[in-house]
Amino acid sequence: YKAVVFYMMAGGVDSFNILVPKANCQGGRNMYNEYASARGVNALIYNELLDIDATGSGQVCDTFAVNSKFPLLHQLYAQGQALFLANTGVLNKPLTKYDDYATESKVQLFAHNHMSAECYKVDTQKKIAGTGVGGRLLDMLRRQGFH
């Protein structure tokens, strides 16, 4: 038996309280220090993090880490039973921080309630109205030969 579990943490927890860039980053950057500087007193403590190997993933760092208060998530990732979708959002077309997102996007960005609703639908262009994230994932996997 296999299942896709879409776990939406609505409120209280954000991605940088779970997954942290740690080491071996592109261009010799110290992404943990950048993270800690941006998070201030809310930054997770470096020596308490649970390392995960992201080598070959195409991410900015080869080593990320999980909050030590989530050892089961760390274990499931290491076993290939969990994955992270970090720095994601809902856009109906590619935009940069220099674009006028207020007029260029059909989605109301930076509004938690609107982004949550769009995330559940995963249909920003309303091509398949009423479908949910699970059904859309299943359709995509079937098209690629997975049953």
Image (tube, rainbow, N blue to C red):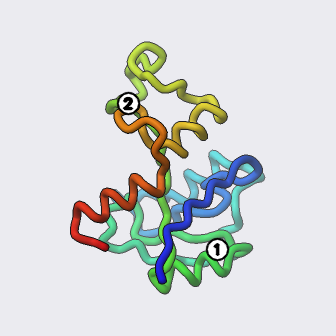
Expressed as whole percent of the image width and height from the top left, the position of residue 143 reads 23, 60
> Label 2 neighbourhood size at 10 Å, few (<14), some (14-19), many (20+)?
few
Identify whether 129 is placed above or below 144: above
Residue 9, quarter of the rendered image: bottom right
Q: Secondary structure at mark 2?
A: loop
Q: Which label's residue is closer to the chain start, 2 or 1?
A: 1
Identify whether 138 is placed above or below 128: below
Amino acid carrying label 2: it is: Gln
Indicate which label's residue lies in the foreground, 2 or 1.
2
Expressed as whole percent of the image width and height from the top left, the position of residue 144 reads 22, 64
Decide which of 109, 58 is in the foreground and name it: 109
Q: Residue at x 61, y 60 (%)?
A: 7
Amino acid carrying label 1: it is: Leu
Q: Secondary structure at mark 1?
A: loop
Expressed as whole percent of the image width and height from the top left, the position of residue 70 reads 69, 74
Q: Judge whether residue 63 can be spotted in this image.
A: yes
Residue 114, quarter of the rendered image: top right
Q: In this figure, which residue is indicated by the disc labeled 2? A: 125
Q: In this figure, which residue is indicated by the disc labeled 1? A: 49
> Label 1 neighbourhood size at 10 Å, few (<14), some (14-19), many (20+)?
many
Identify whether 62 is placed above or below 113: below
In the picture, measured across the screen, residue 72 lies left or right of residue 105, that is: right
Q: Residue at x 54, y 28 (%)?
A: 109
Q: Quadrant of the C terminus?
A: bottom left
Asked whether disc 2 touches disc 1, contact meaning CB atoms under 8 Å apart, the reply is: no
